[in-house]
Image (spheres, grey):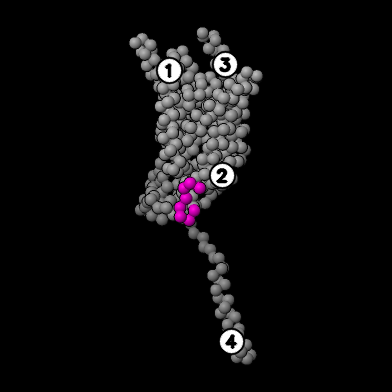
Amino acid sequence: MHIPDGFISPQTYLPAYAAAVGLWAYAARRVKRELDADTLPFLAAYTALSFVLMMVALPLPGGTTAHAAGIGLLAVSFGGWMAFLAVSLVLAMQALLFGDGGVTALPINALAMGLVGGFAALTAWKTFGRWNQTLALFFAGWLSIALPALLVALVLGVQPLIAHDAQGAPLFFPFGLSVTLPAVVLPHLLVGLAEGVLTVLGYRYLTRLRARLA
Amino acid sequence: MSIAIRMLLIATLASAWPALAHDLQYTVVGGQAVVIKLFYADDTPFTFEAYEIYRDGEQLPYQVGRSDSQGRIAFLPDRAADWRIKAFSEDGHGLDFKLSTDAAAQLAGSDKPAFERYSRIFIGLGFILGLFGLLNLYLKRQQKS
């Protein structure tokens, strides 16, 4: 789902950077208040897991690939702001060190996956968890992939409208919404199923481990 | 044959001349192409996806098209230059990188990823765990003071 460099117009990524920098600063203040030495090793391990999951490409029908991300798991285990920072850290490291996902696209990837994906998962977990924990966790994981995919598809699909030359030729990503919505969202609805299972198993394991260590 | 009929025949033949402009011809020559292979992390080729090639700094593409069934792009540079290659699939996968050609229009160099894919996993894990280790030291120092 990471958008590479060269796909996003400055009209999109500059405001996105402004928004992301403000939100990163706010999230850092929140996390500094909430983070303690007991939580930190678990957060480190799950951030590392998220990084590894993003590096493992799953082949999908149609010759494309996608990957799980562990966003739902981070959000239901540690809260939305910690998930946002952890996912942003992984994305920043991938963009700056490895060239996976663009530096110009970093705020969009971080806002879509870390912020929207994380808080969507947390909301789903808090809303439905009281009725059925397993289904709520599964739905949280699925939503943490599906909703960011929808946002990324929208951002990519509006690029030809936002940035084009005098003849109307797109200067950045060339495909419109009619192409990006099905192409990006449909595969991620499938990947979301794997993310849902991962969220259920990961959350239960973490809960047991924390109880054992307490 | 009367003069009128001869003139009519000549006029008819003359009017058919522009039709030759629509007769597409071809020649086949061998050439030294730069071949770029695009593939996903699991080696699945990036097949039949759109690409654009620009001479560095130019707005008009030098070449556009789609990768072949093996995920390859072949193009023939015409001079020493830096070239920008953009490839993109409809689902947002893609690349944007540069290569250069020398005076003989041969490949001289290209952008390369800083680390191989599986090295990245270990480097990334080391980076994350190291960063959290430093954060842990910071938190402990905060607790003591």
Image height check: is A9 above or below A88?
Answer: below
Chain under callout 2: A
Instruction: Tell me where residue B37 appears, x and y as whole percent.
Output: 50, 44
Marks 1 & 4 on one chain? no
Per the model, the C-alpha gap separating discs 3 and 1 is 26 Å
Instruction: Tell me where residue B49 appears, x and y as whole percent.
Output: 54, 46
Chain under callout 1: A
Answer whether labels 3 and 1 touch (C-beta < 8 Å): no
Name the residue: 60% across, 87% down. B6
Residue linked to disc 4: B7
**Front disc: 2 or 1:** 1
The answer to which of marks 2 and 3 sits earlier in the sequence is 2
**Front disc: 4 or 3:** 3
Name the residue: 60% across, 41% down. A182
| Dot 3 crowding, Cα within 10 Å, few <14, some 14–19, many 20+ | few
**Element carrying mark 1:** helix
Name the residue: 61% across, 33% down. A189
| Dot 1 crowding, Cα within 10 Å, few <14, some 14–19, many 20+ | few
* Amino acid on which the number 3 mark rests in the picture: Tyr
Residue linked to disc 2: A177
Q: Is residue B26 magenta?
A: no
Task: Write the start and end of the magenta stretch as one range.
Answer: A160-168
**Front disc: 3 or 1:** 1
